Amino acid sequence: MTIRVLIVDDSPTMRALLSELLRREADINVIATAADAAEARTIIREQNPDVVTLDIEMPGMNGLEFLDKVMRLRPTPVIIVSGLTRAGADATVRALQIGAVDCYAKPDGKIGSLLTSDDGRLATLIRNAASARLRDRSARPIAPPNSPTPAPPVPTRTAHQRPALIAIGASTGGVEALHEVLQNFPADCPPTVIVQHINGHFAEAVARRLDQRCAPTITTAEPDQPLKPGHVYLAPGNDRHLQIRGSATSPWARMRADDKVSGHRPSVDVLFRTVAETVGNKAIGILLTGMGSDGAQGLLTMARAGATTIAQDEATCTVFGMPKAAIALGAAGLVAPLHRIADHALAGVI
């Protein structure tokens, strides 16, 4: 099946470059381009594209405002095309929380380098987006950027123990899912480590945005960093694996520039495997929405080490790839909808 794409960007050069990149792909057809939100809205209404690529900064209605309207009125998979400035990265993360499926970074050098440096990345993102399941946001208004979200009380623990460490893996649709999970974590949550598949240039912006909206302290992880309660650590965009070493009582982060695992670096499989080795049955592993199977084998390793393992259910996933692979392996001790995952994690290990 051919994927029909609309390119929205106020730069004629960028529209031409993105179109040229995608014309190389036999299964992708650029049906139209648009220079602003008004033009894009008409094309979406009349031609119903499968995927939209959207620039953040446009004249008139900006990309965030337009994305919000699209997600409410005519949900369509959207890939944000953004520059690498801090402002661009922050806006991109806001877009991912609104409902954009993924993001694509413009080059920080000559724009024409896209044709030689892309290496099929945009086409891969579009194929992933075309299979995305979009959640209904019509009844859920977007909170102001810096509005605090109170954390609910931790569920009463009976036969459960407080986990020594929580490890989370996510990919496509993961930024929005992480926000929903972490906004229900209390300020004194167990140490939590995350691998989110995203262009490395946006990792710090993801951490900043989540830190603004959630009770725990959320940062990118650093080498040889002790992992403390009340802190959440996101794998940084430095093309290194995030590993956990030390012990269940004194875990710390290690960064290794080893080969890609399951097609990724950082890899969820690497994180989960080292959590199993270090923390064992005192850990909780959570696998959220995402394309592919990264994390499935690692979650199985955690389960075999006695850890509590949770996979997001199909109905609430943007892409039911990674959780599905883990469930098929028998790695998920519990399959839960997104809005229940924090409660299950905070209830503790069995």
Image: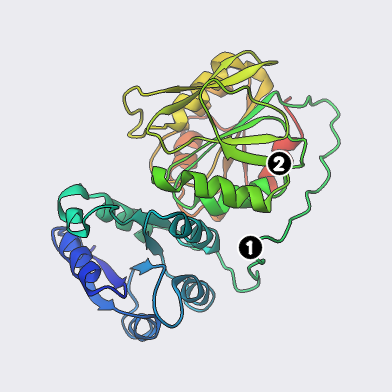
Q: Residues within 10 Å of mark 2 (few under 14, many from 20)?
A: many
Please tell me which residue is depicted at 52% across the width and 29% down the height of the picture. 330
Looking at the rendered structure, the kind of residue marked 1 is Pro
| Tag 1 secondary structure | loop
State which quadrant residue 266 falls in. Answer: top left
Residue 297 in sight in this render: no
Using residue 242 as the reference point, say whether residue 27 is left or right of it: left
**For residue 77, above or below residue 343:** below
Q: Which quadrant holds the N terminus?
A: bottom left
Give coordinates of residue 344: x percent, y percent: 71, 39
Please tell me which residue is depicted at 63% across the width and 18% down the height of the picture. 251
Provide the residue designation for mark 1.
Answer: 145
Taking depth in this image into account, of 283 and 115 the one nearest to the observer is: 115
Looking at the rendered structure, the kind of residue marked 2 is Pro
Give coordinates of residue 280: x percent, y percent: 62, 16
> What label does residue 216 carry, if any?
2
**For residue 330, above or below residue 18:** above
